[in-house]
Image (spheres, grey):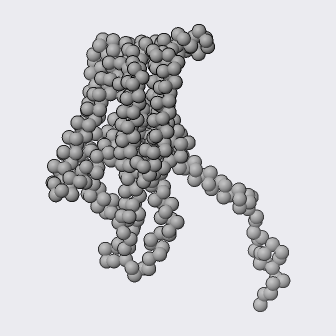
């Protein structure tokens, strides 16, 4: 019979080699494990972004269809609640989407085309005035305005001379738009089938939680799209009315620019507002420019303190730093289209992460359920949706 004296001071029994001490302390090993996990997540994200860029011809229509179905989803659900056939309800919703997007696009493009020369000329006049006072800064702004006009002219002449290239670009755009429209139809009509497929393919009993995450992400996109569209419309109307009262040239085009820029939070409002103020300064002088600045600031205060809390209070609230990083990342990946898509996708990811945090804070449903609580079909009794 052995006693404690038979063991050496290192804790090893006689006849066995002593245990070797770890090379790194436990804190260093934990840090290394977190670094490895971070590198793995970064690698997966990098591969995902690379695949999206390589398959942009298929990914872009899917994302556009997701935004379209999120924007007009409430209308489709109301039509279905009126006992309308799902296919007919989805078809009517897509028809409304075509009318809304086509009408808004026509108004925006026509306003920008009709007043584009006035806006560019006003910016060049501002550059001339600034050159007298600031030198290089004014020259840079003048070059920017001149190059913008030159680029538009070159693009038009290139498209006219290179007919095949122009037809190819237009064909790709039309194909993407038609594919996005069809995908919107199927996303609206077959949403219940997607939920059933999720329950069929989900591993184990994770289907209810996956459904809650998917619903929360889609609700975030839906709230962002509806709220941003309504806020953009109010901003554009208010600024257009203010510029018309101040008799600023190109007011309709500047209002259209405000409407489009509102889909890029913070950055779009800053750029469109700055252009409106510069145009007012060039054509109406310093006093009218101050009034235009007051109009832009008043609209921004109305948006930040009234419209945002009232309209988007139930959607995912993101910190401005997160929004700016998302816009920067989207611009680096896909240019202007990436800037437009990055914020709603970030809202969806934020909603999914919020649902995950709530799930783990409350405890997993499988951990709290007893083994006998599951039914014969393997369901755990967790509600499918919150």
| In the displayed structure image, the side of residue 72 where residue 344 appears, left or right | right
User: x%, y% of residue 290?
Assistant: 52, 24
User: What is the tally of numbered marks visible in this picture?
Assistant: 0
State the quadrant of the N terminus: bottom right
User: Where 242 falls versus 156 (above or below)?
Assistant: below
User: x%, y% of residue 316?
Assistant: 45, 51
Whether residue 280 can be seen here: yes
User: Where 61 falls versus 30 (above or below)?
Assistant: above
State the quadrant of the C terminus: bottom left
In the image shown, does 43 or 57 lie closer to the viewer? 57
| In the displayed structure image, the side of residue 320 where residue 111 appears, left or right | left
At x 66%, y 58%, the residue is: 30
Image quadrant where residue 243 sits:
top left
At x 25%, y 54%, the residue is: 77
User: x%, y% of residue 39?
Assistant: 57, 48
User: x%, y% of residue 241?
Assistant: 37, 29
| In the displayed structure image, the side of residue 183 where residue 87 appears, left or right | left
At x 74%, y 60%, the residue is: 25
In the image shown, does 12 or 50 lie closer to the viewer? 50
In the image shown, does 165 or 193 lie closer to the viewer? 193
Whether residue 207 can be seen here: no
At x 49%, y 18%, the residue is: 281
Q: Residue furthest bottom?
A: 1
User: Where 108 falls versus 149 (above or below)?
Assistant: below
| In the displayed structure image, the side of residue 69 where residue 137 appears, left or right | right
């Amino acid at each position: 019979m052995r006693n404690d004296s038979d063991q050496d001071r290192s804790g090893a029994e006689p006849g066995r080699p002593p245990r070797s001490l770890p090379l790194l302390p436990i804190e260093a090993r934990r840090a290394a494990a977190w670094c490895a996990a971070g590198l793995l997540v970064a690698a997966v994200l990098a591969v995902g972004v690379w695949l999206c860029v390589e398959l942009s011809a298929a990914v872009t229509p899917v994302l556009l269809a997701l935004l379209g179905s999120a924007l007009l989803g409430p209308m489709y659900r109301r039509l279905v609640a009126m006992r309308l056939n799902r296919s007919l309800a989805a078809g009517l919703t897509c028809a409304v989407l075509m009318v809304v997007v086509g009408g808004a696009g026509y108004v925006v493009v026509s306003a920008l085309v009709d007043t584009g020369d006035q806006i560019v000329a006003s910016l060049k006049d501002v550059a001339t005035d600034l050159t007298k006072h600031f030198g290089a800064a004014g020259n840079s702004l003048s070059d920017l305005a001149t190059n913008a006009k030159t680029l538009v002219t070159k693009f038009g002449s290139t498209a006219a001379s290179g007919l095949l290239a122009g037809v190819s670009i237009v064909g790709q755009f039309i194909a993407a738009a038609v594919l996005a429209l069809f995908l919107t139809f199927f996303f609206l009509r077959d949403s219940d089938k997607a939920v059933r497929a999720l329950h069929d393919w989900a591993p184990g009993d994770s289907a209810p939680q996956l459904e809650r995450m998917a619903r929360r992400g889609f609700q975030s996109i839906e709230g962002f799209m509806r709220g941003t569209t309504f806020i953009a419309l109010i901003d554009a109307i208010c600024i257009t009315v203010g510029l018309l009262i101040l008799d600023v040239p190109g007011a309709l085009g500047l209002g259209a620019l405000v409407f489009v820029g509102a889909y890029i939070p913070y950055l779009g409002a800053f750029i469109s507002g700055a252009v409106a103020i510069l145009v007012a300064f060039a054509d109406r002088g310093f006093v009218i420019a101050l009034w235009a600045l007051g109009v832009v600031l008043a609209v921004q205060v109305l948006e930040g303190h009234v419209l945002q809390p009232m309209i988007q209070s139930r959607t995912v609230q993101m910190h401005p730093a997160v929004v700016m990083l998302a816009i920067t990342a989207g611009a680096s990946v896909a240019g202007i289209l990436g800037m437009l898509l990055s914020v709603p996708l970030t809202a969806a990811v934020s909603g999914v992460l919020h649902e995950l945090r709530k799930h783990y804070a409350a405890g997993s449903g499988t951990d709290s359920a007893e083994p006998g609580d599951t039914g014969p079909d393997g369901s755990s009794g967790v509600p499918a949706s919150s």
